[in-house]
Amino acid sequence: MSQKGYKCLHIPSGRIFVSRHVVFNEQVFPFRSESMDGTATATSNSTRYSNHYTLWAPVFYPQQPGPTRPADALGLSTNSINTSVSAAPAQDAQRSPNSNSSDRVADQTSSAVNSSHLPISHSVASSSTSSSSSTMVTSSSSHPMTTRSKDHTRRSRKFPDFVAFLATTPTDADPTNFAQASKQPQWQEAMTKEFQALLQNKTWILVPPPVDQHIVGCKWIFKTKRHANGTIERYKARLVAKGYTQEEGVDYFDTFSPVVRPTTIRIVLSVAVSNQWVIRQLDINNAFLHGELHETVYMQQPPGFVNTSHSSHVCLLKKAIYGLKQSPRAWFHTLSSALTEFGFIGSKFDPSLFIAHHNNHTTIVLVYVDDIIITGTSTTAVNNLIATLQQRFALKDLGPLHFFLGIAVTNNKDGMILSQKQYILNLLCRTHMTNAQPVSTPMAVNTTLSKYDGEPFHDPKLYRAVVGALQYITITRPDITFPVNKCSQFMHSPTLAHWTAVKRILRYLKGSVSHGLHLKPSTSTQLHAYTDSDWAGCPDDRRSTSAFCIYLGSNLVSWSSKKQPTVSKSSTEAEYRSLALAGAELVWVQYILRELHVPLFQPLVLWCDNIGATYLASNQMFHARTKHVEIDFHFIRERVVNKQLMVKFIPSKDQIADGLTKGLTASRNGASFDKSRRTCRSNRSVLPQNRSCLDLKAHNHRPDESDDRASKRFYPSKKWKAESEDEKKDPWGKEKEMPTLCRFFSI
């Protein structure tokens, strides 16, 4: 057989399944009844499975050494066994409900069960078989080896991550409406708790229904909150308004509310880890209820909690409530006003980042709706801020950062690890991919996806839901950014070929479910980026893909893989557009670090594997071939001339961003996973260790279709070599820690 695993019998259906993940229960034996004297119960139970087990009769091998055949050990000839097995289907076919053959079969099977307690076939259950089986069971039980059945002990078993998670996750789904939840006590308690919080917060007042006003409906939403390991934390019931029934200009006006960017979170965490700052996590209870409404909104009374004295009244909302279109904006305005009173200043480059500098101490607040991260140079200042917020809002101090926005945060001596293992396991479970075969790469080499490939996929809604979940996983998994970007381009009309590409990403995630983003303490604050592009990679419109990854010291803080908006006429043009995109992101990260008072001692560095693009950025030349990229040209040239940015060459084999523009082989996919140590080991270094990246000759480089390096006139002069040697040292003369691909994802 091509399958490996245990044969399992599903008793209700009588079917046999092969599974690799089996939990052994030695305390229950379904074929053994309480009365072993051949009663009707034992006979009927045995008869149910006798026909099935005729084809799967166990063969007992002798304990003593010798050339004795298995058939001789049972006291039967080989011909008798073969005849019984082959004749079993014929007996079943000839048997009728009114014949007595069934009774004879049941009696023989019951006798076999009583004698050996094993589900053997009736055709081999003779008197000699019973005696032989009994003798063998006795000799087997008298073996000197101590087994678990003898000493009555059970040893804990270690299962793979996804098996252990599924074992701790209940199969019952959350209720979808009030009628279902009202029948379960845990959800009744959750609804009562939420309703009491609404009344305590004075969210509404009951008034007679107005005649000329629109009344918004409401409903209950139920969600089981879980810890990072998958265990149940609490049952959450939330009353939400049916905001989709609101009318713009009547019930609401402005709705936009900012949230912190994932790149900002990674930058702040990288700085905090490098400086060993305390990092705390807060959760605001019923955050939207603290927002003040400036519009008049009427809502129906909550289902199940209608006031008996005023059953016809409606709720005039005084505070914002979940579901209203303006609720996020109202809550953010309330929180930002409070932080401003406490001395914080909102960032000009990320509105959800708040910074306070007092007495040579820096305190930082990151806001993502009702989830808040607080860190800073002073532990006392952080504790004082938490105490002040507790006086203003009802919040929970969750202690050190450990689980934020579905991301598990693990701290160890080597830094901090960000992982979305639970989120990935949930996605694998929802897509029924828990038993899929893992693969070593998220996308096969030379894979090109087109909107004309294959037949239309039968469930576009499922495709969009899975790809949307994969987009969220890219917050900590840059290794799947490019394939997810490619699959996201076919949301409007997915095909079977596109769904196959999505399933390959899921198979890759199953094999690397424990991978994450590793932020290490670093003494360097240099900002450097790696840029790459594929020229005319899309077969439909021949547009290129721009990609970059930005490091703060040795920590990866930002990355992107994005399709270019226009067609590039050459690979140099495509690479130059990638330079402009990465340069803009580098400047933005630089501004964030300046607001955090993080010193930057060296100019920004862009590593590019296209000699033509590096030469174009470093020399004052302009002609008709580059006129259509004039904006990008001036953006990069201006910073290069002012020595704010340096564009340098790196060979393609050392280009980190290469995996963000194309599918790679397993050996080049960044890192190999060590199953025994559960760590990531880099297969290649990012930069050459013994010589400068720029000290390269044309005969030492193999040009490909993605660059213009074949022409020797583009290669840099020898005077650049001395400059590159000094770049490996920091301002204090120490050797810099060069980033490696294992910074992409480690365990």
Image: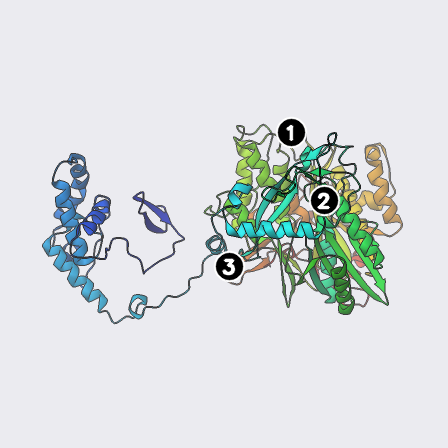
User: SS at mark 1?
Assistant: loop
User: SS at mark 2?
Assistant: strand
What amino acid is labelled 3 in the image? Lys
Mark nearer the viewer, 2 or 1: 2
Q: In which quarter of the image is residue 268?
A: bottom right
What amino acid is labelled 1 in the image? Asp
Front position in the image: 718 or 205:
205
Q: Quadrant of residue 418?
A: bottom right
Front position in the image: 561 or 571:
561
Image height check: is 539 above or below 475? above
Front position in the image: 39 or 270:
39
Residue under numbered circle 1: 540
Of the two numbered discs 2 and 1 on the same chain, state the one appearing first in sequence. Answer: 2
Q: Position of residue 485 (x, y in %)?
A: 64, 40
Front position in the image: 65 or 501:
501
**Quick one: which residue is furthest to the bottom in this view?**
144
Q: In which quarter of the image is residue 321?
A: top right
Of the two numbered discs 2 and 3 on the same chain, state the one appearing first in sequence. Answer: 2
Q: Position of residue 565 (x, y in %)?
A: 74, 34
Of the two numbered discs 1 and 3 on the same chain, state the one appearing first in sequence. Answer: 1
How far apart marks 2 and 3 lie (CA) works out to 60 Å
Residue under numbered circle 2: 205
Q: Are marks 1 and 3 in contact (CB under 8 Å)?
A: no
How far apart marks 1 and 3 lie (CA) works out to 40 Å
Query: Which of the numbered marks, if any, corresponds to residue 675?
Result: 3
